[in-house]
Image: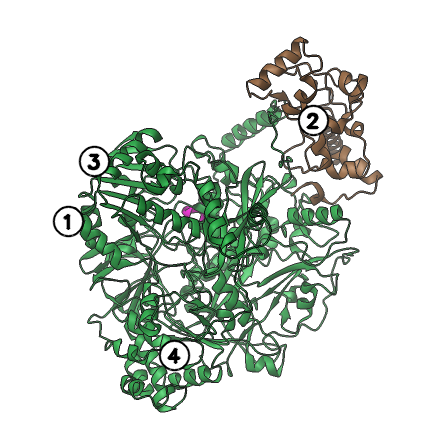
Amino acid sequence: MGRKWQVTLIVLAVLGYGGWVIAELNTNVGYAPEQPLPFSHKIHAGDNKIPCLYCHAPAEKGRHATVPPMNVCMGCHKSVAVTKENVIKLAAAYKADSAIAWVRVHALPDFTYFSHRWHLAKGVACQTCHGPVETMDKIVQVQKLNMGWCVDCHRQNKASIECITCHN
Amino acid sequence: MSENGNGKKQLRYWVSLEDYSGDPAVEKTRQEEFYSKPESVMDELDRGGTAFSRRDMLKLAGVAAVFAAAGCARKPVERIIPYVNQPEEIIPGVPVWYASTCGECPAGCGVLVKTREARPIKIEGNPDHPVNAGKLCARGQASVLNLYDPDRLRQPVKLSRPGGMKQEATWRQADSDIAQSLKAAGGKVRLLTGTIHGPARKRLVADFLASFPGSRHITYDAVSEEEIRAAQEVCYGEAVLPRYRFDKADVLVLLGGDPLAGSFSPVEFARGFAAGRKVKDGSMSKVISFEPVLSLTGSSADLHYQVKPEDLVKVALGLASELVVIQGRSAFAGNAAAISALRPYSAATVEKEVGLPEGSIKATTAELWSARGKSLVYAGGMVAKDRSALGLEIAVNFLNSALENEGVSVDGTFSPSNQSQGSFADVLDLIADMRAGRVEVLIISGANPVYSLPSSVGFTEALQRVKKVVYLGDRVDETGELCDYVLPITHPLESWGDAEPQKGVFSLMQPALRPIFDSRSWEDSLFAFARTAKAGVLGNFTGTFQDYLKSVWQKEIYTRYNLAGSFEDFWKNALRRGVFSVRNEDDAATPRRFKIEALAQIRRPGKVDAPYRLSLWAGGIQQDGRQQNNAWLLETPDPVSKITWDNFVSVAPKTAETLGLSESDVVKLSVGGVDAEIPVHIQPGMHPEVLAVAVGWGRKKVGRYGDSVGTNAFGWGKIEKNRLLTSALPVEISKTGKTNQLASVQAHHVMEGRPVVQEATLAEYRENPKAGHPEHKEELISMWKPHEYKAEKWGMAIDLNACIGCNACVVACQSENNVPTVGRDQVARGREMHWIRIDRYYSGEPENPEVLHQPMLCQHCDNAPCETVCPTLATTHSADGLNQQIYNRCVGTRYCSNNCPYKVRRFNFYQYTHFYDEPGQSPLELVLNPDVTVRTRGIMEKCTFCVQRIREGRERAKELGKPLADGDIVTACQQTCPAEAIVFGDLNNPESRVAQMAKEPRGYRVLDVLNTHPAITYLTKIRNREKAEEV
């Protein structure tokens, strides 16, 4: 093999590896934006042991876990911690019929169809993908949530790795 | 012609006249890799230029690098906005279905509306509904797009007449102004609507009229069937519109009617028609058509005769004469009145005068008589509406009575139809009243007379004599702009309402969402007027139309039919099912006695004193033009001509030659002094002395997509003796020297003369069930290891006998799969995006060809040629046999499309979907199905076998803890197909319908000589004839 070829191969290998590194680093791990209200999962899910599905009930029934509607918040906060500053803000927003625009942390691309329901049905814990939420004051993304990461888990659990399982 | 495997001459198929005559341009297109190329760059290359200079290339590379780097930046912040109070029934991501009634035409089909997060995204037929049994036409499927039409009127408008200065109005202001006029009118009030049925709606109209004594209601349908009703009155004593039972007709004779397209109950008719076309135990129905224009129904006929529109009545009388006078058959044999009326129309005379082949009348009569009691003679529609239309319908009634079809395939007593009630004579009376100042307030709803009446009736001028004109419509259209008020009405998906399409079938319409705009149903507007005027019954009614509807249903259905259980239970059940039918489907109609004196009313058929006569027709896609702002429908090809985005005048090939016309030449047509220009389409199968134009085009004020698309053919209608004639109109045709390139889709995916469609006659089929298709014997060796399908293997079977070519599947697929529309220019370049298309093939001579419709979609081949050439593995094979297309992996090399022998892959040459999120287009984006990716520019797409529906079906089965059963999963095309020509399922399950059909001797796979192993089986088209030559 001529020297030219060797150089070409090395350059390609470096570029390829570089591309992979960039792709791996360019995940949203560590993303923890400020939220309009400093809702703490630690207080709700950790200290008070409210089950995840109490608020994120649709996760069991459909694709989306959803941020709970405000009437769910107010179910408790009509009587619980009503004097706290942020709860007052929440109640005011509810009364004004204006929803709080939370900042999305865990996001998959629009061409990816992920269903919470069937992952829950298979017994996948929320924490597998979302990390130890019950310890977080502010939600942070802990897992890469990129395709390689999904497929790894699918492989380990002998789940489908058909393209159209997630893409259609 | 070539020999096929059976040693039989194979028919030569052609898709256009250029193809037939071997035009070198078609040959050149065939040799091209793509139907059209990216314009400028490729043209430059063709001329030998280099298109890009080195500098340009570097500049572009630089820009690309910058964008690539920018692409690595963090994604934009996304917001999650939860409900404040989440409605109980909504689970985000899970559809909620509502049962309702389609409001696009008065056929009154039942629908199920799929909503996601409270917005409708898809409409499907309601399987419990007796009229459409789960099926829908293209227009019904497209209805959901109308809901989000950005050109809908968003608030009440007051206009100043004349001049049309628009200003916004408030509801209160409009109501009080109109109420005042109503009170002051002293009964000089007229309500002009389209066909209305449904107990509550009819009661509302009656109550409204009673609230203003002296007022009248006029029903007007632009496309009406009033001759049928009139003839029924003459023949049987009551002006009913019978329910035609195509499902009970083993022999069907069409005399200029097109029941499957522009008729008053197209889905029901298509269902019945196609059921008979399917081959069962070696037999199938026989369809014989006599018509001037090659219609959709006529294109499925086994025998097709060309007849001038004014001669249709002679054919009907010829058939009757042969049957009763010559052969002396039927109960009328020997009846002096019948004999004297029919004697002049002996078969030989008629055949000679009309130009039919010798013996055709006798043969048709023999077919009809042998199937007496199980046959049907049908005439209707615009093509039959000439001077002799009433006579034609009387003759048809006589034939049906003589053939003992009355009470069997013609139901005029048990459950007759309410689906078309318009009366043109009433409209003329109204105009006379308006002219004479006998109308002070005119309320128009569900009709667009300024557009659809010929200007010679003087509706527009008469309108100026009316003090107050109120238009209840969804836009300021042709009629709206000449009114004082345009009050926006809700879309049927936003409305309460009811329908009684056929006697005893009560259909309920309920809203699937709250009105998007500041609009009000026309019913509630009538309420508001009466209430503001404090007039009559309605003035005292305190609730809304919803409450009124409920109370009427309680009185007129629940109480009247003595139903068990509480009314609330009945009501909830009716809402859930969408329909309440008191019709016992096993009961039959009773035959009525034909009044023989009716025959005397048939006037001697006249002659048209002109070399050419014009016939107007209403197609199944645009029909009367009320949906002309619907881009899905505009881009749906006309089923026969395959032309999109325009109407045209159809001219027979011979006539085009005589007149020196070529395709897309613009001609001027002049009918009784009304001139308009229109492009020419040379249509095989037309009568050479007939020109034909579809109505429903050429709207001026419909919106951004439909404005000025096509020519308004309603304008050529002629008034004669209080009747509207739309056929046999003497016409002058002259060239203008201009051309207007028609955007036809048929030549796009040319098939190189390969054996793609296959057919046989019934006689051949009986002899050899495998007739028509060459046996594919040797198994070719494949380079690839065969796939293993351990669980399901999805496949499809399509019965070419059942397919009528209506295009409902095309629109259903578009709705389900977010298929974009691309516009006329892109269609002309061969870039339409439809995942499923209906290919229309002709065979035989252009003067009177045979037609074959073939749905073509991704064949999901086992050895898929596309999969092996994709450099990025964007298209791969799944374990259940799907050929998967992964958009995020595709880089748009188009190798797959080039390698696909079926030409079913579609490339996004532009960002076709961007119009969904352009600011002025809102709320159009809401129509998108959130379960299907919206594709971007530069990637390939194609049919997925509705993979999201497969997933949904699997999940439903899992939820119920049951294994997947056959029929649990239906694709969107199959779901809506009125002909039930498409069957989807698991080929690995030997019990499944699809596996059974795949094994049928008629089954063949397209181009399986290429060893592609398609997952779709087509069933050979069988023509109900003895010999191949007999056409």
Element under label 4? helix
On the picture, is B156 further left or further right than B300?
left
> In this view of the protein, which residue sits in the foreground, B870 or B847?
B847
Chain B on-screen colour:
green
Residue drawn at the location 67% of the way across and 63% of the way down = B994
Chain letter for the residue marked with disc 3 in the picture: B
Q: How is the image coloured?
A: by chain
**What residue does disc 4 label?**
B399
Residue drawn at the location 58% of the way across and 71% of the way down = B1020
On the picture, is B872 further left or further right than B185?
right
Crowding at mark 1 (Cα within 10 Å: few <14, some 14-19, many 20+): few
Element under label 1? loop
Q: Quadrant of the C terminus of chain B?
A: bottom left
Which residues lie in the magenta part? B823-829
**Three-letter code for the amino acid on which mark 2 is drawn:** His
Residue drawn at the location 21% of the way across and 35% of the way down = B163
**Three-letter code for the amino acid on which mark 3 is drawn:** Gly
Magenta residue check for B893:
no
**What residue does disc 3 label?**
B163
Chain letter for the residue marked with disc 2 in the picture: A
